[in-house]
Amino acid sequence: MARLKKQERQKQLTEKLNTTPFLTDEELAAHFGVSVPTIRLDRLELGIPELRERIRAMATGHAHEEQGETILHEIVGELIDVTEGKQALSMLHTTPDMEDRFGFVEPQYLYAQANSLAKLVMGTTVCSTEVGNIKYKTPVSAGTNLVAKAEIVRRRGDKVFIWVIIRDKIQEVFRAKFIMESVEGRL
């Protein structure tokens, strides 16, 4: 690619990130044939946040525009990474207010983390969960950081099969297999 003038490069950079918001600075630098610091300076001048902030914006609903309406993604935990249509990662720091009377984190917090991440990886919050096969493998105490990974493993027609595994530092503590279907077109 021939070197572009700064204004044209910045215009194309904005367009590129509007269509593909999860590109890294390194990928953008390679695409435009410039250095990573040049891309960072361009982003700063244009007010475009770094990748992590763009991902967070996607998770909080500032990213999907469909028919003028924003789809809000309420993520339980902190979004770490997402490749819409493929996989996503989040982290949940458990706190004492999540504990039951026996000192373990209430199961609904793990389910909520898994379910919200599954919806995000599908790219919609307007969906029905047709099957939710869940398994709590180990009790979790407050103060634990839980990392969830949601992955689309299969598609069959309108149905999307998503596996979500939540781990603490050592082991798997929760597993869910969801079969979900988008219902946006039916509303």
Image (cartoon, rainbow, N blue to C red):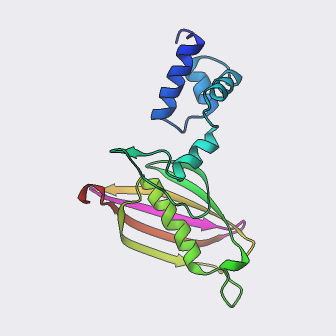
Q: Tell me where residue 151 appears, x and y as whole percent.
A: 49, 56
Residue 55 visible from this viewpoint? yes
Q: Is residue 141 visible?
A: no
Q: State which region is magenta.
A: 157-171
| In the image, residue 124 above or below residue 52 | below
Q: How many marks?
A: 0
Quadrant in the picture for the C terminus: bottom left
Residue farthest front in this picture: 68
Location of residue 166 in the rendering, given as x and y in whole percent from the top left corner = 59, 67
Is residue 142 shown left or right of residue 31?
A: right
Name the residue located 44 percent from the left edge and 75 percent from the top edge.
133
The residue lying furthest to the left in this view is 186
Is 64 rendered above or below residue 132? above
- Residue at the spot x=30%, y=56% of the render? 184
State which quadrant residue 95 falls in.
Answer: bottom right
Q: Main secondary structure of the magenta part?
A: strand
Identified at 51% across, 64% down, the residue is: 164
Where, by quadrant of the figure, is residue 149 drawn?
bottom right
* Residue 83 percent location from the top left of the image: 51, 46
Q: Residue 26, position in %: x, y? A: 64, 29
Farthest bottom residue in view: 101
Whether 149 is drawn above or below 170: the answer is above
Q: Is residue 92 magenta?
A: no
Viewer-proximal residue, 144 or 16?
A: 16
